[in-house]
Amino acid sequence: MLRTSCLVLLLAGCDAAPSEDPAVDDAAALDGAALDATPPDAAPDAAPLDAAPLDATPDAALPPPLPSLEGPAVAPDLDPDPRVVEIELRASAARYRLGADLEIDGLAYNGQSPGPTIQARVGDELVVRFKNDLDEATTIHWHGLRIPDDMDGSPRIQAPVQPGETFTYRFVLPDAGTFWYHPHVNAHTDVELGLQGMLIVHEAEPPVFARERLLVIDDVLVENGRIPPPFRNRPELMHGRYGNLLLTNGTTEPKAGVAREGDVERWRLVNTANGRFMDLSLEGARFRVIGTDGGLLAQPYETQRLSVAIGQRYDLEVTYDRPGTARLISHIPVLEGENVVVRPFDIQSIEVAATGSAPQPVALPEVAPPARGRANQTAVLTFTVVEDAETGVRWLLNGQDGGHDSHHAGHPEPMFTFQQGDYVRLVLDNRAGPTHPFHLHGQFFEILPDGRPETEQPGLKDTVLVPGLSQVTVFARMDNPGRWMAHCHILEHASLGMMTEFLVEPAE
Ligand code: C2O
Ligand code: CU
Ligand code: CU
């Protein structure tokens, strides 16, 4: 049993310069009691959607049924065509529950936070009929999808949807993988208030696991029963907001589930916090990483710890090789008296029933290793910070202030112009204290050693953690033409200037 029952203090930005350490002047209390375990939820698995295509002709091959998902409920598909997923999404103010006796006023898609899970199959067309019932303009960004730029929710391309208005997002899903969606106007405020959800794109022939679990991992700051407005103090300007409550799929209640010894599951997780990266481990079961931002890996790998940057996704294969309790744990620095101690908090716990059966390996689809090339371009992005009389600080990329993320005139020109097909060596040079999770829209990249083997990470990514005062090099194949936002995914940093655009010109 983990010791999480005392009142502890969550520390922000443990990688920060000491003078900027928010814990010193602003440690937020985490009510550890809310994380105590309750009996496992024995609810049966949800039934798979789209199991029976309605209009298949006898000679058409039926697509295999989609796996069932345990997690935030799946949005119903309103289109009977098996290759089109059509859903309705409505953003509005909502009062929703974070825990047994905690309700807050926030924002939600379809009244729930996280919003409904969208699931489809690679190659399907996704149609999202969106209605904005917020009292501010907004867009929806499909984080990680390589879709046309005018469907990407960039407020520099799409005029934001005004209050009371509608917009239809429509695009083909090019890649299988674990993705998410969130607004790209006032994101630092509105994601914290609850606007976010998962988007699962299944492989053409999905591997058959005992079940798939979705884990939206987040934290939220609640003070006096409400989520306070942004930028309330200097630590938030420096590190983004750190919450005092850990959420799994929108609840502070411990996420409990059941499985059987011998089961092999797929877990899909995303870190949707504003400022906090997650350092995870799993006990009581075996796991390996089978997918990253860009989908399944050519070569799954084992690890003890998994560091999940804001916006990153991981797919894990979890194998229950013994009965008992399996726990996914987030290791979080907390302040106890005068000391900073890293404490374990449950993200998910599973009661594994004894069966005596040995796990059978799950056949994964063949995945070709990412296409590499010889880098024909090098681009350098420096991350710095300056004081600002009005907003406190500004966060800069190559010395440029990208403005805020809303739709207004006067954005700087794209920082770089590439040609479709360019293979770009992108050096991310963090010269300012805190870690920055760098995110690029519309393309994937690989984190290759480039002389520093310790920085390599397997798989395709769209987000990478760049630790303080260090460099990380990524190699991006610019194969999706358009104008693409590139920014720090600490949403407060993006909002305070750490935001730019890359232009990818189409090949003729
Ligand atoms: Cu999660 Cu600009 O994105
Ligand atoms: Cu994105
Ligand atoms: Cu940042």
Image (cartoon, helix red, strand yellow):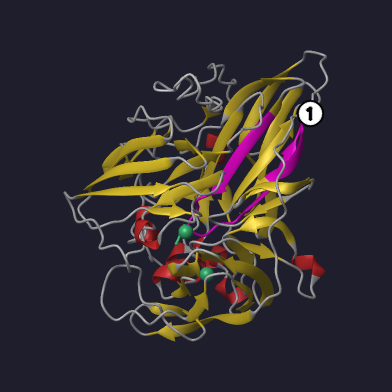
Residue at 38%, 66% in the rendered image? 231
Q: Is residue 6 visible?
A: no
- For the image shown, how many numbered marks are present on the structure? 1
Depth check, front residue: 262 or 504 = 504
Q: Which residues are magenta?
A: 265-290
The furthest residue to the left: 164
Residue indicated by mark 1 = 361
Look at label 1 and name its amino acid: Pro
In the picture, the quarter occupied by the N terminus is: top right
Which corner quadrant of the image does residue 111 belong to?
top left
Asked if residue 251 lies in the magenta stretch, the reply is no
Disc 1 crowd rating (10 Å Cα; few below 14, some 14-19, many 20+) is few
Q: Quadrant of residue 100?
A: top left
Viewer-closest of 499 and 152: 152
* Residue 133 locus on image (x, y percent): 21, 46
Q: Nearer the viewer, residue 191 or 319?
A: 319
Magenta segment main secondary structure: strand
- Residue 294 on image: x %, y %: 60, 52
Q: Is residue 43 left or right of residue 132?
A: right
User: Would residue 459 be found to the left or right of residue 227 on screen?
Assistant: right
Above or below, 21 against 140 in this view is below
In the picture provided, is 209 more to the left or to the right than 239?
Answer: right
Relative to 1, residue 91 above or below: below
Name the secondary structure under disc 1: loop
Please report the residue visible at 57 percent of the width from the left and 40 percent of the height from the top. Answer: 32
Q: 158 or 270: which is nearer to us?
A: 158
Magenta run includes residue 282? yes
Q: In screen coordinates, is 460 left or right of 67? A: right
